[in-house]
Amino acid sequence: MNIIILGPREPVPPTKGGAIEKLTWGLAKGLAKYGHEVTIISTCENPISKYATENVNIICISPPIPGSRFYFREMPLFSYRAWKTIEKLLMNKPNMKDDVIVHSVYFYNLMMFPPLNDIPLVVTEFEHYPWIPEYLYHQPFISSLDMTKWMLDSLIRRELAQIIFPRTSATVFVSDYQKQMALKRLKLAWNKAITIHNAVDTNFYRPMDANELRERLGDGAELLLIFVGRQTPHKGFHILIKSLAKLESKYRNRLRLIAIGPKTSGFLTTSSPSSDVYTQYINYLIEKYDLNKSITFVGQIQENEMQLYYLYIQVLLRHLA
């Protein structure tokens, strides 16, 4: 079968380690492994280029898509180019039309597609936003204007979903709760929604001997905690810090929290571009509770390094057992 995947906003194969980029790449490689002809239409630094890797064809049609003017310029342009690329592929391979599925990792990738009756469209909705009002977690840290913009963005996404979802042959959600909230918010009486949980590459994340990592990563700590992701309110990093502060010092001194990911909340900024309310709040909590020796920020790391941190946790668990 020919499977065309409309990729995410960042390049695939992933260059920055984004979760959805990893999931897209893992899905493509897995499908190719089972004998399917897989093509990803995605973004890259040098647009309108084509290359193949690990039995997956990749066609780059756009630079990475920024957040600004997302629905009004960059995203419609990407969607239009994606459809024209698919049209060209079908023209070059007429028989392909009888054996093709278009799979989008974001539903709004399909916003410029015409209604299709003869090509199955599948959407995998990785994000819980806008079905769950994520912006409510950010309310203490953003202005009323930013809150209004976020609510408007959520409304636009839901309106697009109302148009696009009924056109699909199936929409895949990554949890039952996400599916339930999406259908509730959209008020769709719809039986094409299914749940497929995210997968883990067990060939990469597998038990290994990692005892030599103990001193290098743990710095003598008996217990290692790991936080992975952007420091953003809905991920609860501030709650984790407050939880550490509640521990008695004799317990707190025996552990270390390693924060992996960019030390920024990304889109949560005040009117001054140089300041970030949430990052300032995190720094305030660390100073207030004297946690500088308990938390290590390692920044964004490569995927192969991530494997080492998870392996170290396995070693510690065996050590404590």
Image: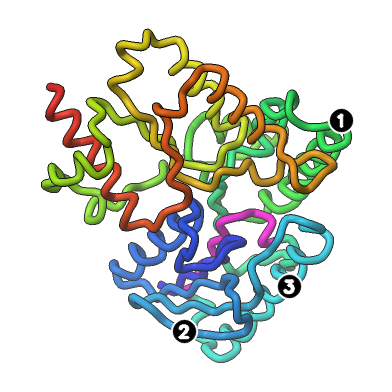
Q: Is residue 239 left or right of residue 63?
A: left
Mark 3 neighbour density, 10 Å: few (under 14) some (14–19) many (20 or more): some
How many discs mark residues in the rendered view?
Answer: 3
The circle on residue 51 is 2
Disc 1 target residue: 144
Q: Report the amino acid beneath label 1.
A: Ser
- SS assignment at label 3: helix
Task: Tell me the residue at 69%/56% (across/down).
Answer: 108
Q: Determine which quarter of the picture holds residue 311.
A: top left
Residue 183 can be seen, yes or no: no
Q: Is residue 182 left or right of residue 95?
A: right
Q: Residue furthest bottom?
A: 92
Q: Is residue 109 magenta?
A: yes
Type of the residue with mark 3: Tyr
Left or right: residue 240 compared with residue 37:
right
Residue segment shown in magenta: 99-110
Q: Is residue 223 above or below residue 196?
A: above
- Which mark is first along the chain, 2 or 1? 2
Q: Nearer the viewer, residue 243 or 51?
A: 243
The image shows residue 34 at horizontal and vertical percentages of 29, 67
Q: Which residue corresponds to mark 3?
A: 80
